[in-house]
Image (cartoon, rainbow, N blue to C red):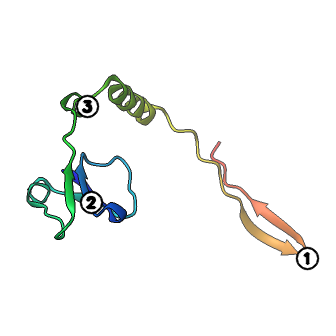
Amino acid sequence: MATLTYVYADQTAVLGPLATYAEPHCYDLCEQHAVRMTAPRGWEVVRLEPDPDALRPSSDDLEALADAVREAARPRPEPIPVPVEVGRRGHLRVLRTDVDA
């Protein structure tokens, strides 16, 4: 996978590692299309090779994964009951909340 970015002012197409966030005028390509990609006549294609060490999970990645697992395992707080209007007189409302005791 790779991300293709056009720099129109320089007539350059930059093909680099998969972007971590979406930007306008950037296109994610599969491996097959990234290898076969060509640019319009007169344009330059710059291919940025990813750093092999950057492709491996870092300690930050592992910590983020562990934090996500811990968060998913935490007990959820009890839902707050939603009041239901059962009557109205003028600007006053009678509300009922069903609470399981």
Quadrant of the rendering where the C terminus is positioned: top right
The crowd level at tag 2 (other Cα within 10 Å; few <14, some 14-19, many 20+) is: some
Q: In which quarter of the image is residue 36?
A: bottom left
- Residue 70: % across, % down: 42, 29
19 horizontally vs 72: left or right = left
**89 or 74: nearer the eye?**
74
Q: In this view, does 40 lie above or below 27?
A: below
Residue flagged by tag 1: what amino acid is it? Answer: Gly
Residue flagged by tag 2: what amino acid is it? Answer: Thr
- Residue 54: % across, % down: 25, 31
Say which of marks 3 and 2 sits in front: 2
Q: Is residue 100 above or below residue 24?
A: above
Say which of marks 1 and 3 sits in front: 3
Q: How far apart are marks 1 and 2 (CA)?
A: 69 Å
Residue wearing tag 1: 90
Mark 3 and mark 2 lie on one chain; the one further toward the N terminus is 2
Most extreme residue toward the front, as rendered? 42
Q: State yes or no: discs 1 and 3 in contact (Cβ < 8 Å).
A: no
The crowd level at tag 1 (other Cα within 10 Å; few <14, some 14-19, many 20+) is: few
Q: How far apart are marks 3 and 2 (CA)?
A: 25 Å
27 horizontally vs 9: left or right = left
Q: What element carries label 3?
A: helix
Residue flagged by tag 3: what amino acid is it? Answer: Ala
**68 or 74: nearer the eye?**
68
- Residue 68: % across, % down: 40, 34
Residue wearing tag 2: 12
Residue at 32% across, 61% down: 10
Q: Which mark is residue 44?
A: none
Q: Distance between the residues labelled 1 and 3?
A: 66 Å
Residue wearing tag 3: 54
